[in-house]
């Protein structure tokens, strides 16, 4: 039985890695309010008892709502912060790692050309992240929603940070943008899958369009 965070009455587990690290979301009491935070749990000594340090609140920003939806074998988790409602939400795709909480939108140095990464739904051992994003605008119901894939490039980026590259495959034109990530000679490729997508649809669409 995975415990809840402080004062919580419910929780949900979404993913587990090969080290038995489990991530999800749990409600908790903050003052007089009930919030929902991303958590990480691992029964390190396998005694089936929750010992000190085994249940971690990943939301170091103390948001009112967050969740960790996936974790890779390096212990890097991804998810969101804010309301995840598909139409009226305000969430931001997040990465949880090493006691930090990073908005993935801020890792694209030159911006996302009007897109907002709303939720990260998967991460693999290579650090590739998939999820869904939407266009910004005052009319929430008319916003366009697509799947995305972020790739941390290990090789040098030979293109200008703002230069788009169009790769034509058998099915669709995939727009690949190279962006410099702060803190090293890395790049992020933003792949627009070309189809409207919500949460689960976004994950499938990203898997189906891993070209370029």
Image (cartoon, rainbow, N blue to C red):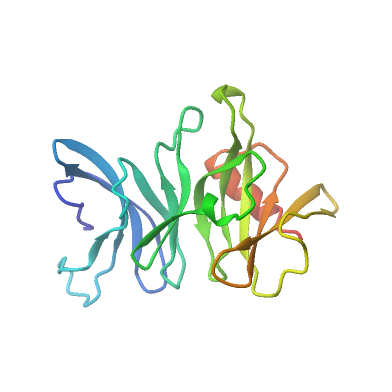
Most foreground residue, 83 or 180: 180
Question: Which residue is at a point 64% across and 52% down the rendered structure image?
Answer: 110
Judging depth in this view, the residue of 113 and 190 nearest the camera is 113
Which residue does the image show at 20% across and 52% down from the upper left? Answer: 5
Q: Is residue 9 visible?
A: no
Task: Name which quarter of the figure residue 146 lies in.
Answer: top right
The percent coordinates of residue 86 (x first, y second) are 50, 33
Residue 186: percent from the left, percent from the top?
A: 62, 69
Above or below, 44 against 124 in this view is below
Quadrant in the picture for the C terminus: bottom right
- Vertical comparison of 148 with 129: above or below: above
Q: Is residue 56 left or right of residue 120?
A: left
201, 33: nearer the viewer: 33
Residue shown at the point (53%, 42%) measured from the top left? 199
Q: Is residue 189 left or right of residue 39?
A: right
Q: Residue at x 82, y 48 (%)?
A: 171
Residue 52 pos. (x, y %): 15, 68
The correct choice, above or below, for 12 with respect to 156 in the image is above
């Amino acid at each position: 039985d995975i415990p809840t965070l402080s004062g919580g009455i419910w929780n949900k587990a979404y993913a587990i890695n090969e080290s038995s690290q489990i991530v999800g979301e749990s409600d908790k009491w903050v003052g007089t309010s009930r919030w929902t935070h991303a958590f990480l749990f691992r029964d390190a000594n396998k005694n089936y008892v929750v010992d000190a340090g085994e249940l971690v609140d990943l939301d170091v920003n103390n948001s009112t709502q967050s969740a960790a939806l996936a974790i890779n074998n390096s212990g890097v988790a991804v998810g969101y912060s804010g309301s995840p409602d598909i139409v009226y939400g305000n969430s931001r795709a997040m990465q949880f790692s090493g006691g930090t909480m990073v908005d993935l939108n801020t890792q694209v140095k030159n911006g996302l050309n009007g897109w907002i990464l709303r939720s990260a739904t998967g991460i693999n051992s290579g650090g590739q992240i998939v999820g869904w994003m939407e266009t910004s605008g005052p009319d929430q119901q008319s916003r366009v929603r697509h799947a995305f894939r972020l790739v941390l490039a290990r090789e040098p980026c030979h293109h200008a940070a703002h230069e788009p590259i169009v790769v034509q495959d058998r099915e669709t034109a995939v727009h690949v943008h190279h962006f410099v990530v702060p803190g090293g000679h890395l790049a992020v490729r933003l792949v627009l899958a070309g189809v409207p997508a919500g949460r689960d649809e976004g994950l499938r669409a990203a898997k189906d369009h891993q070209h370029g």
